[in-house]
Image: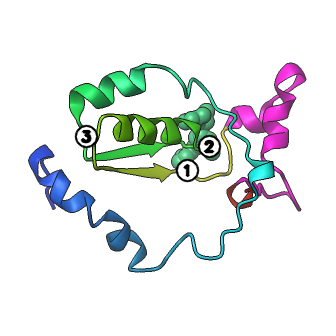
Amino acid sequence: MNSPTRSELPAKSGKLRELIFRGQDIYAGVAADPTKVDMQGWGSDHGIFAYCIERLQPKLIIEVGSWKGRSAINMARAMQDFGMDGEILCIDTWLGSPEHWLAEGAVEAWRASLGIVHGYPTLYTHS
Ligand SMILES: C[S@@+](CC[C@H](N)C(=O)[O-])C[C@H]1O[C@@H](n2cnc3c(N)ncnc32)[C@H](O)[C@@H]1O
């Protein structure tokens, strides 16, 4: 199967959620607690996001390694600011990277962010 060309992507991106989740509302039952929002991220506020979005005008952004979504939210805001109608697909294991597991000293909070319960990260279920 050939990869879609850039000109084919817009038509496909509108159906992405349907294609992946087959009509299931993945947000149903998610009880977000605004008092627990944690917007920690890495370089998530850098101007490179808006710069690229304005120039490339993407209909679909696929972010591999979303962590807590701070970059994704900023990319979404940039798309809104530019009046663009697009989608962002966030991909992550939500199991963390080696640096989260091996963190020591000043970056010990990275490990704590994983919310390990019974040996397994609970990051995905955090509000
Ligand atoms: C440095 S964080 C990403 C920071 C994020 N983009 C932000 O806005 O702050 C790296 C992320 O990559 C994820 N990750 C590591 N290996 C992965 C893999 N093989 N597939 C998907 N995600 C992965 C980790 O779970 C972690 O959330």
Report helix, strand or loop for mark 1.
Answer: loop
Q: Amino acid at mark 2?
A: Trp
Mark 3 to mark 1 CA distance (whole Å)? 21 Å
Mark 3 to mark 2 CA distance (whole Å)? 22 Å
Mark 1 to mark 2 CA distance (whole Å)? 7 Å
Q: Amino acid at mark 1?
A: Asp
Q: Which residue is mark 2?
A: 67
Q: Is residue 66 among what the camera can see?
A: yes
Q: Earlier in the sequence, mark 3 or mark 2?
A: 3
User: Residue at left 44%, top 19%?
Assistant: 47
What's the magenta region? 98-123
Q: Quadrant of the C terminus?
A: bottom right
Within the displayed image, which quadrant is ligand 1 positioned in? top right
Q: Can you tell which quarter of the image residue 51 is in? A: top left
Disc 2 under 8 Å from ligand 1? The reply is yes
Q: Can you tell which quarter of the image residue 43 is in? A: top right
Q: Can you tell which quarter of the image residue 55 is in? A: top left
Q: Say whether marks 1 and 2 touch (CB < 8 Å).
A: yes
Q: Which residue is mark 3?
A: 58
Label number found at residue 92 = 1
Image depth: mark 3 or mark 2 in front: 3
Image depth: mark 3 or mark 1 in front: 3
User: In the visual, does 56 lie left or right of 20?
Assistant: left
Q: Earlier in the sequence, mark 3 or mark 1?
A: 3
Whether residue 106 appears in magenta in the rendering, the answer is: yes
Q: Nearer the viewer, residue 4 or 26?
A: 26
User: In the visual, does 8 lie left or right of 56?
Assistant: left
Q: Nearer the viewer, residue 87 or 42?
A: 87
Disc 1 under 8 Å from ligand 1? The reply is yes
User: In the visual, does 53 lie left or right of 1?
Assistant: right
Report helix, strand or loop for mark 3.
Answer: loop
In the rendered image, residue 115, in percent from the top left (x then y), is placed at 83, 51
